[in-house]
Each structure stands twice: as structure tokens, then as C-alpha cells.
Amino acid sequence: MRFLSNGPSIPDDLLIARDAGDVIFFCGAGVSRHRAGLPDFLKLGGDVIDLLGAGEKSLARKLFQRIREIGPMDGVGGLVATDRIFSLLEREFEQKDVQAAVARAIRPADGADLSAHRTLIDLSRGRDGTVRLVTTNFDRLFEQSVDGIACSGPPMLPNPRSASFEGIIHLHGRVNADYTGPGDEEFIVSSADFGRAYLSDGWATRFMQSLLARFQIVFVGYAADDPPVQYLLEALNLHAGNRSRLFAFQPGSNIDDAALWEHRGVRAIPFDNSKSFDPLWGSLAAWRSAHAM
């Protein structure tokens, strides 16, 4: 179904599943970038490099510049994982200083537009009004957009199989209330952090497996080669053809970009972003309004 003529065609089975309370919206940096103006993961790396004052000979700075120069490759995506920037920074600076710089870099401007966050929270409400939404964003914009919603961060995450499962779940951690440092015990930003969460300790993998066993997942605000997506989909070990329970809104109509999702077992839902991302957000707002009727 298309809510807007230039918007994405949302599969009917996804619309039905959402109405039944069987869908979780899984939200990435693109949600906070749109309207609120926060950086994506690559820009965040560059901002943190500058905040820490890394020199021109810094390996992290050199890697950041190289990633920007070579860009993504069609059908492959980014050739270097952005989380390696933060791993290199943790070799040059204290981990706590890197984490504090991340928190400072994503501090929103006063009066930031949170309409995209409110739209997703409304879409995430069940018939009883309960909100269930997962994000890998470190910011607190979902909490800021609507009062009174339970929130949790790692490693003590709620059990998706439990009847009491609800709230905003920050899978990779969140900053503290004044944006001066981490607000959770786990704060997943470097390659080592991702490895611990999805491999050695595996708490993020276990959470994702439980989440997928109960819900269909809709990725919003990600590219298929974003580090968070790569790690969590590799942890699920899905393959093309096993895609009935995962969806992703995909900017543009590039077949190679859609194939990156499909290869990982996710059904891509393309939309026209040639002029702006308004076709996506307008469609999501219309979906929310249709649900409220």
C-alpha cells in the first residue's frame, strides 16, 4: 500500500502484522539525523576525531579521510567498517574520553525537531497503548519526545518473550541525561565493543534472537552496510529467502543496495529520496494517522 504517490509501497502483510501488535520498529541514526540534525555514524567518527583534537598523523583521522575518499561500492557497501575509527581512537586516547566525546557530538540543539521520533513512537504503540521500540542510537530523543515511557539499556535488557516486554530499548547503550558520557554499563561504539556484545559475551545476539522469535522487525534509518546492521544480522545468521519477518526502508531504487538487504535475509522497501527523505517520513506519518482512526 502506498500512503503517498511518491512514497514506499508498504507490504500488506506488514500492515496487518503491525495492527496485530507483531511488529517492532528498529531505529538507526537516520531517524535522529532527519529533522533533529544529529550525525550519522561516519560523521560522528569525524566529529569525535575533531573534539579529541587528534593530529594529522592520527591513524583514526587517516582512516576517516580514506573512508570518505573511496566511498561505498555498489553491491558491496562500505569497504571499511566505520567502527574501526573508534577502535583506533581508543588506542590514541582513554576510552572514557572517546565515549565522552561521542556524547558531546550527539547533543541535540535546543528545540530540535522531534516529529520523526514521535511518529515512530505512535506507530510502535500496541492496541493497549504500550510502546515497544528498539534503537541503536545513543541519544535520548525518543525519551525526550514523549514523557512517561519506560527505557532500558545494556547489558540488562528486557526479555522480548515476556508479556511485560515494553518501552524504548537502547540496544547499544545511551548517553547520560546531560550528554557528558555513557548512561549505561555497555556503550557499543568500537569494533571491540561490537565483538563483545555479539560474539564473546553475546548478550546482544541473544536479545536479537528472542526479538525475532516473537516479532517482525522493521529497520528505519539504516543503510545495509551500517556497522550495527552488519553485526546484528550476521549474529542472526539469516540467508536470502528467509526474509518474511524482517523489512527495511531502503533509500533510492538502486538494485545493488536492495540486494545487500536481501542477501542478509531482509526484504527491502525502496522509496524515492532523490529530493529529500520526505516521501518516507510523510508515508510513516500517514500510516500513523490511518492507524489512529
Image (cartoon, grey):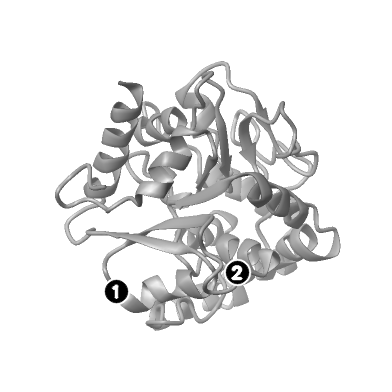
Category of crowding for the residue at label 2, using alpha-carbon neighbours closer than 10 angstroms: few (below 14), some (14–19), many (at least 20): many
Could you tell whether 23 is left or right of 237 in the image? left
* Extreme residue toward the left, this view: 5
Whether 27 is drawn above or below 249: the answer is: above
- The answer to which quarter of the image holds residue 71 is bottom left
Q: Position of residue 241 (x, y in %)?
A: 52, 72
Q: Amino acid at mark 1?
A: Asn
* Extreme residue toward the right, this view: 201
Q: Residue at x 29, y 74 (%)?
A: 254
Q: Residue at x 58, y 73 (%)?
A: 239
Q: Amino acid at mark 2?
A: Ile
Whether 130 is drawn above or below 174: the answer is: above
Total marks in image: 2
For the C terminus, the image quarter is: top left
- The answer to which quarter of the image holds residue 227 is bottom right
Q: Position of residue 144 (x, y in %)?
A: 50, 25
* Camera-side mark, 2 or 1: 1
The numbered dot on residue 254 is 1
Q: Position of residue 76 (x, y in %)?
A: 46, 82
Q: Which callout, 2 or 1, points at the residue further toward the start of the chain?
A: 2
Q: Check contact, mark 2 vs mark 1: CB within 8 A.
A: no
Category of crowding for the residue at label 1, using alpha-carbon neighbours closer than 10 angstroms: few (below 14), some (14–19), many (at least 20): few
Q: Residue at x 32, y 40 (%)?
A: 284
The numbered dot on residue 85 is 2
Q: Residue at x 22, y 59 (%)?
A: 272
Q: Position of residue 208 (x, y in %)?
A: 68, 52
In this view, the residue in front, 177 or 238, is: 238
Say which element carries label 1.
loop
In this view, the residue in front, 217 or 33, is: 217
Find the distance from the CA under tag 2 to the CA under tag 1: 28 Å
Could you tell whether 274 is left or right of 266 in the image? left
Say which element carries label 2.
helix
